[in-house]
Image (cartoon, helix red, strand yellow):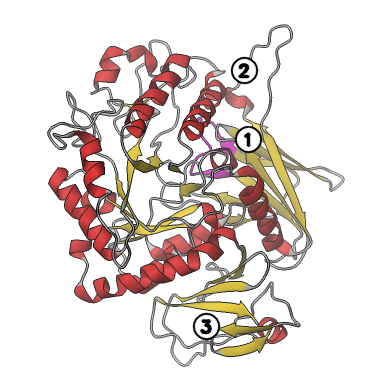
Amino acid sequence: MIELRGDWAREAMKVRRRVEYGTQGFGSNTGYSSHLHNPFFSLVSPTTTESQGEAWGFSLVYTGSYAAEIEKGSQGFTRAMIGFNSYDLSWNLGPGESLTSPECVAAYSEKGIGGVSRIFHRLYRNHLMKSKYAAEPRPVLLNSWEGLGFDYNESRIYHLAQESAELGAKLFVLDDGWFGNEYPRATDNAGLGDWQANKERFPNGISHLVNQVTTLKTANSSTDLRFGLWFEPEMVNPNSTLYHEHPDWALHAGEYPRTLIRNQLVLNVALPEVQEFIIEALSNILSNSSITYVKWDNNRGIQESPSPSIDHAYMLGLYHVFDVLTTRFPDVLWEGCASGGGRFDPGILQYFPQVWTSDDTDALMRIYIQFGTSLVYPPSAMGAHVSDVPNQQTGRTIPLQFRAHVAMMGGSFGFELDPAKLPADEKALVSDLIALAEKVNPIVIQGDQWRLNLPEESNWPAALFLSEDGSQGVLFYFQVRATVNQPTPYLRLQGLDPTARYTLDGNVTYSGATLMRTGLQYKFQGEYDSKVVFIEKV
């Protein structure tokens, strides 16, 4: 079996293990799908590879607590189950009432694990993701979080937006810290739930800032810069006006003390009044400003529940909130986030066409995380940004081009840094990297993916994206460590028409058969080198 394990900042680590006699499994009982185990697994033959052999995949269309169970019986038959987690679920049904369980999507391929992945990718892109943006190229963005954190005011944010436009970004995103008055959001211990702009930071309100930013022109274009905003609507700080007015809205277990995680509590979204509060709080802001992007965060799970029905009732309430808001604001690009990829699941993708894949923006770790996530989820749904170095999570320093090429493998490409701190030589590269990202993005959004070399198996990870009609493609090819007196192995492509001819970067032409049987060989320069190669069918 293959599963996706992990934790915060190391989501979707692929683990392959033998199915033993008896029962084995995993799941979540924290009220959300979680960083620890994604609600997906695959059953494969012992000899199955990325491109050959039988493979089954099972993906749960649900965002709440769940359980997966695989049992091998004494006669050698294997049984698989994924669905509700019965550990913390009890649901009373009256006469004529029913409970609908989450759907499980099962996919089968004789073309290996990659074959199963491509089935899921097409299915979710074309039939699950309802947003108008699901099949559209995404705007290159710059997010304020890693660049500024909580340390800003209106002038500093406007200056950052100006620098974003000068770089060529099409969307500026103001992250955490913009709200709260009686309890200002100057750190993470106050303000959640008070969704009004902080008057000290933004004396003229958030709409005034939005109007200023959206009159900026992006570099090398006549396009106005777009504006996005961060929310964490399911949470509340005890240091907030909302909590003091409605302490009963926070989830709690009787008289037991409430547990703080990141200094916050979880609102009981099972309550209709909480659902209405969230809907109206966001609607008031989105209706009165030209905000075209929302990052919806969620930074903790449910640890205290007043009853064993709350987790599922919470999720039904949350889906109702998502449905109302995405229907009311169809032109807003919604992105899900849960301290990174803690809620990367098909339930979220029904409403949000993209998810922040991980809080770890280190490019090397992102190869593992994005390759793992792509076992079941389309790369079009992945948020991936270029961050500053040394990286805030790992301390690693990686060249800008490598960082950018890794981020381009996600559907939502952007930057997570302060442009003023970029070295001059790197800043000079950004314009060309953005142009490359915008050229790559339509193929990543709408194309099929082949994982050619896996990061856990090769020093040269590689992935190929091909348009569904096979006419265009883009190859991402990386060298992690420098080698001495060791030629780069030939890289065999997949998914091409063996009888057709293909040009590489508009220059050399090869037959599909040659590219798939013999392959390509490139020279790399030192560690963390990378190449992006365009392929076109003649």
Task: Quote the CA–CA distance across marks 2 and 1.
Answer: 15 Å
SS label for mark 3: loop
Residue 210 horizontal/vertical position (percent):
26, 42
The nearer-to-camera label among 3 and 2 is 3
Can you tell which quarter of the image residue 129 is in?
top right
Q: Secondary structure at mark 1?
A: strand
The picture places residue 391, in percent across and down from the top left corner, at 30, 61
Q: Which mark is residue 67?
A: 1
In 3D space, how far apart are the residues under numbered discs 3 and 2 (Cα atoms)? 58 Å
* Residues shaded magenta: 27-38
**Residue type at numbered disc 1:** Ala
Inspect the image, locate mark 3, and give the three-letter code of the amino acid beneath it. Answer: Asp
Residue 30 covered by magenta stretch: yes
- Residue shown at 41%/17% (left/top)? 252
Callout 3 environment at 10 Å: few (<14), some (14 to 19), or many (20+)? few
- The residue sitting at 18% across, 27% down in the picture is 181
Say if 408 sits above or below 262 in the image. below
Name the residue that disc number 2 marks. Answer: 90
Q: Earlier in the sequence, mark 1 or mark 3?
A: 1
Q: Which residue is mark 3?
A: 505
In reply to whether residue 300 is colored magenta, the answer given is: no
Q: CA distance from mark 1 to mark 3?
A: 47 Å
Say what secondary structure mark 2 lies in. loop
